[in-house]
Amino acid sequence: MTTTTPTRRLSRRAAALAVLLVAIGTLAAVPPAARPARGAVITDAGPGDVAGSAVTVHGRKQGFEDFTGLAVTVSQTRELANQAVTVSWTGATPTPQRPLGVDFLQLMQCWGNPDDPNDPDGLAFRETCQFGMNLDAPARPGSEGGTQPTSNLAGRRSLEWSVPSDYPGRDGDEILPGDARMVPFRTVAGERSRDGSAAGPYREVPVPNNPGVTRPETDVDVLREYFSEASTNEYPYAVTAADGTGRAVFEVQNANLSRHLGCGAGYTVNSENRPSRPCSLVIVPRGHHQPYTGEDVSRTGSVHGSPFVPSLWQHRIVVPLEFQPVAEPCSGGPAARRINGAEVAALALTSWRPSVCTNAGPNFSYTVVGDFEAADQLRSASESAPGLVLSGDPMVTTAAEPALVHAPVTLSSIVIATNVDVNLVDPNEANGPIPPEVAAQRGLALSDLRLTPRLLAKLLTQSYLLDAKSGVPATNPQSIRYDEEFLTLNPLFRYWDAKKSATLNGLMFSYGSTVAAREVWRWLWSDQEARAWLQGNADEDRMVINEAYRGVFAGGLPESFPKLDSACTSEIDPLGEEHTHCGIDLRPYLTSMGESALQTLRADVKGTSSFFNRLSTSTSYGYEKIPRQSVGTRFAMSVTDSASAGRYGLATAQLCKPRRDTIGTLLASTDCRGATSAAMTTAASTAVDSRVSGVRVIDPVKAWSAPGAYPLTTVTYAIGDTTDPAEARRDYARLLRYAVGAGQQSGPDIGQLPAGYVPLPAGLREQAMVAADRLEHPAAPTTAEPTSSPAGAGATAPATVPNVGNPPSPVATPAPSRPASAMPVARSTPGSPLGSVRYLLVAVLLLGLVGGVAGPILQRLATRSTPSNGAK
């Protein structure tokens, strides 16, 4: 159930989120080593390489397995933060479809020295690995010769498989105490978990729903003290396709997300400060031979046991990782100048800030708020108001208000991020043969999912049966994968696994009023078919909008993505306690576009299902959490920004214009556009005049009409107050000059332009330099007026534009523009059907604050400057 806040301003302030700022790091070579199998730096950068730090490593022959043909490449190994890296491989044995117990890879992040001479077999090093939450366990192949308690294999850290009787009770190379039940986890601070031995006995834990009854804890119970199913980045099951290749997008975590690994956190040894302990990506290839007898079990069973069993751990491949320091980069310097604004620019500001503040330069803090809230704060007469905000919405001022300058700083886009594994129906259950070209894609990551404006409208209005608790007619499809419109654009899904779990658990998106949300609705409304459907007309297959959204758009387009499924149900458990489950529990908001991208990578919607568990003896009574989808069955999508999608290595959907034949039958589209650099740059060339003289914005409707332009591209402006104190204006101007100079060099290093952003065209860089001069010297700008076509490549930049960064994006000179407004198509008015829908319940704002996000999420009051030791 929800309540509403009384004003837009309160809602936007309540939605303010701080962005984690990471510090500068240093580059160092990753040397190859002989033991264990290690990677060598690729000196010839390839397509997946990031700043020359990609690493390729080969497996080796050990025991009964021969992995010498396996070549694994990690896309980035230096300058890492909370992000994702791509792990790809060739030369592996294909993973069989079912049962899933042989020939796969396991990935995990560890800390510590893998080459410690006192630990030649790495049996102490394995204790530092974040692994064991029993995620994505392969299908159990059966009893095959009886069972034996898995705990007798002391290498166990979960993966609860039955162990055949022909396995020894204990690996001969195991070094743990004889009565140990698991490999313990050892934190970077030196704490060692219980292992079930007499020296570290398991505790007794209460049995849910059975007062007074206890049971011994399991290894998973122990590990939850350090990481959990929701926070772990372990990848226990990476599959290999039929051609011997594979690809996994692996989430790496610094000390802010995994403090027990401590990657990127400094420490002291004998009074000597050191930047960070060693961290590594560890890959354990699993073959198809019984590790003690050499029997080939590829057709009969599985290679049992956790990756920490010595006979399996011996195959490990270690790739060293170097993280950017997580310490505050500019502590001890000047007070931080306050900057507030749109999330779409947050990752760029996070990168630029340390490069500006070093060498006694100015320090800045950045707090994410909605674009409209940022404008309210800049207009405020309060001494605590920020002197610079970032927004996609140019600000009109009156004669009585301070003069403002507008400097374009980033070019990026709103995207639909996807994480979809090709999950085809079992050939034995298929209705007819599966074409070979389709079958060959089994298990691969889908990178070219396509959507029309109407399909996105259906997702945003929770109009599929599985997306809402109420309001969806029974004649609507269960999910998007059954929608004929979707199948026409994505015919591969006609061969999809029919299990209910192999589908989309709703589209993920965050709350808050933003220009990004407004522009998405404007684009949808411009499409004739999407607009008719939003107005209540059925599509050709009789699918209609969720009843809760009927009439909403008659009062104007939203500036947010409202969740209007207000239905609630309740259950009384056997102990007499009432449990309530509402639509917002099933499909909760996420806190930010960054979190939306991260949860897409994890394939975890953070919701609870409508199933009420009243029988379980292993968990408490209640509505069950929707689990992460397993590797091989993932189907996750979110609305996010291109920079967040790039940070987490996510594919993004192509947006397609619907195409029909002469009798109106929908055809596969021939005009689909992805958020590529070229498509965003083309969209920038279509920019039109805004309500602010000399400031141009990208109209999604006009961009959609231009061949090759990605319609949801946006320019974010830094808007400065010329009445700020002179020292503050000088500092802000310095940041702007850096942002459009060296800050336009694409790359992962501190100070560079992160993935997902496109270098600004020359005209926009020129405009930013002019704005910086005007901000620092309001009465006497030192550079020329911007050209009449600031987005065009033909603009001549003034001499003050630094010759650094990427070359300006080449764009065609814009066609003559029509007058346009940066205002939404229609704002809500008092008494409109949107009413209080535009504002979000404070309780909803708290949803998702606990869990894996890219650093602490803080709500910070606007202050013009904060102590440098407290800046974030």
Image (cartoon, rainbow, N blue to C red):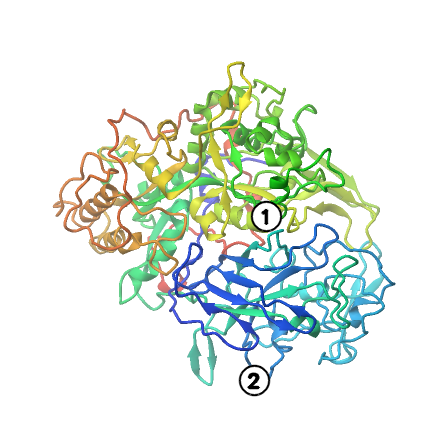
Q: Position of residue 471 (x, y in %)?
A: 65, 26
Please give the label number shown on residue 117: 2
Q: Residue at x 63, y 78 (%)?
A: 124
543 with respect to 199 (left or right): left
- How far apart, in angstroms, are the residues tagged by discs 1 and 2? 39 Å
Give the camera-side residue of 78 and 785: 78
At label 2, which amino acid type do we have?
Answer: Pro
Local packing at callout 1 (Cα closer than 10 Å; few below 14, some 14-19, many 20+) is many
Q: Residue at x 45, y 66 (%)?
A: 323
Q: Position of residue 745 (x, y in %)?
A: 31, 54
Local packing at callout 2 (Cα closer than 10 Å; few below 14, some 14-19, many 20+) is few
* Picture quadrant of residue 790: top left
In which quadrant is the C terminus drawn?
bottom left
In which quadrant is the N terminus drawn?
top right
Give the farthest residue toward the top.
663
Element assignment for label 1: loop
Element assignment for label 2: loop
Does residue 585 appear in this view? Answer: yes
Please give the label number shown on residue 373: none
534 with respect to 496 (left or right): left
Q: Position of residue 118 (x, y in %)?
A: 59, 85
Total labels: the figure holds 2
Seen in the picture, residue 209 relative to 296 is either above or below; the reply is above
676 with respect to 788 (left or right): right
Name the mark nearer the viewer: 1 or 2: 1
Seen in the picture, residue 508 relative to 519 is either above or below; the reply is below
Give the camera-side residue of 146 and 373: 146
| Residue at which label 1 appears | 444
At label 1, which amino acid type do we have?
Answer: Leu
Give the camera-side residue of 607 and 366: 607
Does residue 832 appear in this view? Answer: no
